Amino acid sequence: MDAPLLALTRRAAGTLETAAAENMRQLVQLRWIAVAGQTATILLVHFVLRVPLPVVEMLGIVLVLAFANLLGMIALPRHRVHDGEIMVALLLDMAALTLQLYFSGGATNPFISLYLLQVVLGAILLPSAAVAVLVAATALSYALLSLSYVPLALPRGLLTDSADLFAIGQWVGFIMVASLLVLFITRISRNLQARDANVADLRQHAAQEEGIVRMGLFASGAAHELGTPLGTLSVILADWRRMPAILDDSVLATEVEEMQAEVQRCKAIVSDILHSAGQPRGEAMESRAAGPFLDAVAEAWQAAHPQVPLDYARDKAEGAVVAVDAALRQAVWNLLDNAAEASPAGVRLTAEIEDRMLVIAVSDWGDGFSPEALAKVGKLYQSTKGAGHGVGLFLATNVARRLGGGLEASNRVGAAPRCAWCCRSRFARRRAEMDGPSLVLVEDDAIFARTLQRSFERRGYRVRIAADIGQLETLLEAEVPERAVVDLKLATSSGLPCIQMLHARDPAMLIVVLTGYASISTAVEAIKLGACHYLVKPSNTDDIEAAFEKPAGDPDAPLTSRASSIKTHEWEMINETLAATGFNISETARRLGMHRRTLARKLEKRPVK
């Protein structure tokens, strides 16, 4: 029940893991050649040349080798291959060769040169320490075979030609070693070349990602630095449009409108830069009534899938308010898409409140989840459909966690399988409108603060200014305002503690967050701490007043077509899991369903502070 959010590709054949697996596959093929060659040699020498050999023991060694090779073939596709496994494979081949030589003349056997095959392959495939162990084991085996072995009892007819027989055996052994080395080293070298090429591609990709991260940091800084002066211009221009002198002059009024349009264009440019860098601004995050939001999503989804009946009910979620952005819309949409794939005959969407949590459940009448799928729901790239799938549920899980909830999948006895997506909710607040409302402005930029103060005072507000949380606490001792505008990034601290302090003094206070340093995560935290809206600079007095007037959100707001960045969601998920595991990389990698080395490489490129 999970559909791909993006078209992802299968892992390249030249990755480190695939190169190791291919090399192990070559060793398996070499071992089959060894099994066939040893069997043929034992039978030829014993039954054709009439040289007595302990056939039972020697063929038993061949059977053990063949059985080990079968196990290796079965296990190879199911797990990753490490250097230690390759070393064990070579040691196993060397041990089998040593026993065969022990029963057939020891160091006097001309096929003792086959030891070189394991040594050369180890030198190519293994690190230096492992090669040293392999060489030491080979040397020790050779020495022991010189001291202890079962001598060959040559028939009387072969005794006179023993020297020629030994020379022929050496020549055959040389041909075998040379042929096998050329054959397998060529294949292994090709695998290693593909691995090296992939490593070079990964390094280039890492350099490109580092550049993207730097660009994102630059864009974030630019957004903050440009947001305040653009915000000042936006406030002044909005006030100018209300002045009689401007309204009476059509030329000036037109120019002011053009200037306002250019300020908005600058805002859009900064947002596009941040989104391209994988750090989308959180301007779309707002506190909205859950019912109208789900109505809009259900209506839009049904219009896009008219062939799939949708049973929709949200009567039990009346009054719930939730932080809404494009990622939340995409998460609900993904769940509906997945359910429709599993059950084209129809799906069900319900919303209700359970223990002050908003539970959005999507049910279908498909075959349900397998136990393996239930255990991996919400993990990145975990899907029954193969490569390229599993991202949708991962992002839905991440969005739910960012909102203080989670994603649960279940197979209910006698009912349809369902995915239940839940997040923290609060309830819509109502307050009587009052003339001349009081307002506190938490802003550390003095010019912007005074400009905004004058603009609000012209509209009848009683405005006080606090530059930090200390000044805000002093102001609150004298009077608790009805409304507040808080800059998210203050000179000495974050504005989030200010939001928490204001909401604690009056839970009904209307708080608007105004910032040029925006992100989805900070938007979520601001809404959870009590803010009713989240605006990105440049925003003027009209924007702020409009935000005050709709604390429960706009049910008619259009659905955005641009989804949040996968990199942003992935990185937020990594940070959350690291914190939950006490920054244990191994446990974090296990919970995320990725290899430890992959996580380590991501953390090297973008360290966690």
Image (spheres, grey):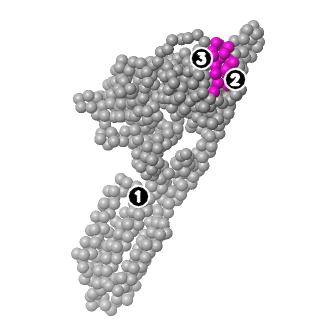
Image: 76 above or below 40: above
Question: Dot 1 corresponds to which residue?
Answer: 81
Query: For the residues marked 3 and 2, what is the alpha-carbon distance in whole angstroms?
Result: 16 Å
Image: 206 above or below 343: below
Q: Residues within 10 Å of mark 1 (few under 14, many from 20)?
A: many
Front residue of 542/173: it is: 542
Question: Dot 2 corresponds to which residue?
Answer: 450
Q: Residue 319's spot in the image, x, y percent? A: 41, 18
Left/right placement of residue 554 relative to residue 390 reads right
- Label 3 or label 2, whichever lies nearer to me, is 3
The stretch of residues the image draws in magenta is 449-466
Q: Reading the chain from its start, which is encountered first: label 1 or label 2?
A: 1
Residue at image location 35% in from the left, 31% down from the top: 419
Q: Residues within 10 Å of mark 2 (few under 14, many from 20)?
A: some
Q: Residues within 10 Å of mark 3 (few under 14, many from 20)?
A: some
Image: 577 above or below 426: below
Front residue of 421/547: it is: 547
- Label 1 or label 3, whichever lies nearer to me, is 3
Residue at image location 45% in from the left, 25% down from the top: 322
Label 2 sits on a secondary structure element that is helix
Label 1 sits on a secondary structure element that is loop
Question: Dot 3 corresponds to which residue?
Answer: 438
Image: 47 above or below 439: below
